[in-house]
């Protein structure tokens, strides 16, 4: 039966028939399998140009009856033809590399297909998709760090991740974290202890400050100290490819830009095949034993959205840059790495994949929470520019005051150290409607506030 290796796993097109699970019936199925399992060869590292090209070169999974879309494998458990086969599967002798599946908490064919897409997107050997972004983050950190382990992390992180590192992991796992200014490379190097620090963790584009990490340099520092570089790329899919810049592991909240519909919670771990396989180990695997399992129906839906992610990201980024430029020209205090006066603009331009822009999120610093709330009130309830809601990557614009919402897990002192102003309004810029229609709504809200003159920074 035709098989091919793709991003860390070998997948057959269809379960082997016959009484011998391991060997029977292959010759009779060659012609059918050639169609069912048709795929391109894996993308060689030297040929990798950008995420869209990699996705187009990844394996395409056809449906059970020749459908252009793959079938959904909704089964929780899988059959075998012989008792000995089950023993061999639990012993690790047979697995998904030869199309043998035990239980969908372990491996599921539909979820693995989404994992292939995520591996292609990020340029990694393998990927595994989880029930949420936080489950992807927590699982990979617990896989890489044992009790008594040490990590170094950026001070500027999503509030949930910060709480995980500050409170949960020390209490439950005896894993401690030193937080540093990730842009002070001397401090990063000094915080990592050779032989003790297992992970350097940071976000490619920080939530919510939009500061950009020097991924190649930080990964070099981590590797010099024997640590694994784990990068959260949720804010910049397609825009940045951390694994191509030196990162060992890339994590995502797929719930955001990759999903695009604000209707699904999901995550992914992208990295070396040996790490992904170790996380699914029956005895020691964090994903296998903690069980943040993605539903196969969710995986199917997401696999249909990834092919147009590049088109969506380009429009998100185009509108964010346009709005940021116009707001800055009006005199507002705007934070957006696509602006030439942003301190990380040159760095992002150097690292970014060509033609995808600078990200779909911008921030307006209103200085106080009261003024931030008033602006959002006008934008939602007066001019219908967008919605007051957390998350990002939706086709409508979503906005929140980060200090009192997604970063509220951090103390006031921690937010100050991270550079999060009390009045920082984070906007995930949508693409529905025309650009000029939406700009008119934004401009009208600013005018209706009655304090436009006081927003200017002279």
Image (tube, helix red, strand yellow):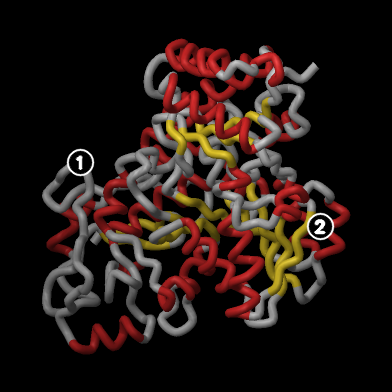
From mark 1 to mark 2, how far is it between C-alphas? 48 Å
Mark 1 against mark 2, which lies toward the viewer? Answer: 2
Position of residue 158 relative to residue 257, above or below, is: below
User: Could one spot residue 286 in this view of the protein?
Assistant: yes
Q: Which sits earlier in the primary sequence, circle 1 or circle 2?
A: 1
Q: Is residue 451 left or right of residue 347?
A: left
Q: Position of residue 377 (x, y in %)?
A: 49, 29
Marks 1 and 2 close (CB-CB < 8 Å): no
Residue for point 40% across, 67% down: 292
Q: Nearer the viewer, residue 417 or 310?
A: 417
Residue for point 64% across, 18% down: 451
Q: Position of residue 187 (x, y in %)?
A: 86, 56
Query: In the picture, residue 235 is in which quadrant?
Result: top right
Query: Which residue corresponds to mark 2?
Result: 188
Residue for point 47% across, 16% down: 441
Q: Position of residue 127 (x, y in %)?
A: 46, 58
Q: Nearer the viewer, residue 47 or 175?
A: 175
Query: Which residue corresponds to mark 1?
Result: 68
């Amino acid at each position: 039966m035709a098989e091919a290796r793709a991003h860390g796993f070998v997948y057959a097109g269809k379960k082997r028939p016959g009484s011998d699970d391991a060997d029977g019936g292959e010759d009779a199925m060659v012609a059918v399998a050639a169609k069912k399992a048709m795929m391109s060869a894996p993308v060689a590292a030297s040929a990798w140009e950008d995420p869209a090209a990699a996705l187009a070169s990844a394996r395409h999974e056809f449906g059970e009856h020749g459908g252009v879309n793959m079938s959904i494998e909704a089964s929780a458990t899988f059959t075998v033809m012989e008792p000995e086969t089950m023993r061999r599967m639990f012993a690790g002798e047979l697995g998904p590399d030869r199309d043998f599946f035990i239980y969908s908490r372990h491996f599921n064919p539909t979820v693995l297909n989404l994992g292939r897409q995520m591996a292609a997107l990020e340029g990694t050997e393998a990927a595994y998709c989880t029930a949420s972004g936080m489950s992807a983050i927590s699982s990979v950190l617990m896989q890489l760090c044992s009790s008594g382990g040490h990590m170094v992390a950026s001070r500027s992180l999503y509030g949930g991740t910060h709480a995980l590192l500050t409170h949960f992991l020390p209490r439950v796992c005896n894993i401690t974290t030193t937080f540093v200014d990730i842009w002070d490379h001397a401090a990063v190097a000094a915080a990592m202890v050779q032989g003790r620090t297992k992970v350097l963790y940071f976000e490619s584009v920080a939530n919510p400050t939009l500061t950009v990490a020097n991924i190649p340099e930080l990964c070099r520092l981590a590797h010099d100290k024997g640590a694994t570089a784990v990068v959260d790329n949720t804010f910049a899919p397609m825009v940045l490819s951390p694994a191509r810049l030196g990162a060992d592991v890339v994590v995502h909240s797929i719930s955001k830009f990759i999903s695009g519909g604000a209707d699904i919670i999901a995550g992914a771990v992208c990295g070396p095949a040996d790490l992904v396989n170790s996380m699914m180990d029956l005895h020691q695997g964090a994903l296998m034993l903690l069980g943040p399992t993605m539903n196969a129906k969710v995986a199917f839906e997401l696999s249909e959205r990834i092919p147009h992610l590049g088109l969506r990201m380009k429009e998100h980024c185009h509108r964010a840059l346009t709005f940021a430029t116009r707001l800055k020209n009006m005199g507002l205090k705007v934070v957006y790495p696509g602006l030439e006066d942003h301190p990380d603009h040159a760095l992002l331009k150097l690292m970014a994949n060509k033609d995808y822009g600078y990200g779909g999120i911008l921030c307006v610093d209103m200085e106080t929470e009261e003024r931030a709330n008033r602006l959002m009130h006008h934008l939602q309830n007066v001019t219908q520019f967008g919605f007051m809601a957390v998350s990002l990557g939706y086709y409508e614009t979503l906005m929140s005051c980060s200090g009192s919402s997604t970063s509220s897990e951090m103390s006031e002192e921690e937010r100050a150290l991270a550079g999060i102003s009390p009045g920082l309004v984070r906007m995930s810029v949508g693409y529905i409607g025309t650009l000029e229609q939406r700009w008119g709504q934004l401009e009208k809200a600013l005018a209706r506030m009655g304090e436009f003159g006081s927003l200017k920074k002279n």
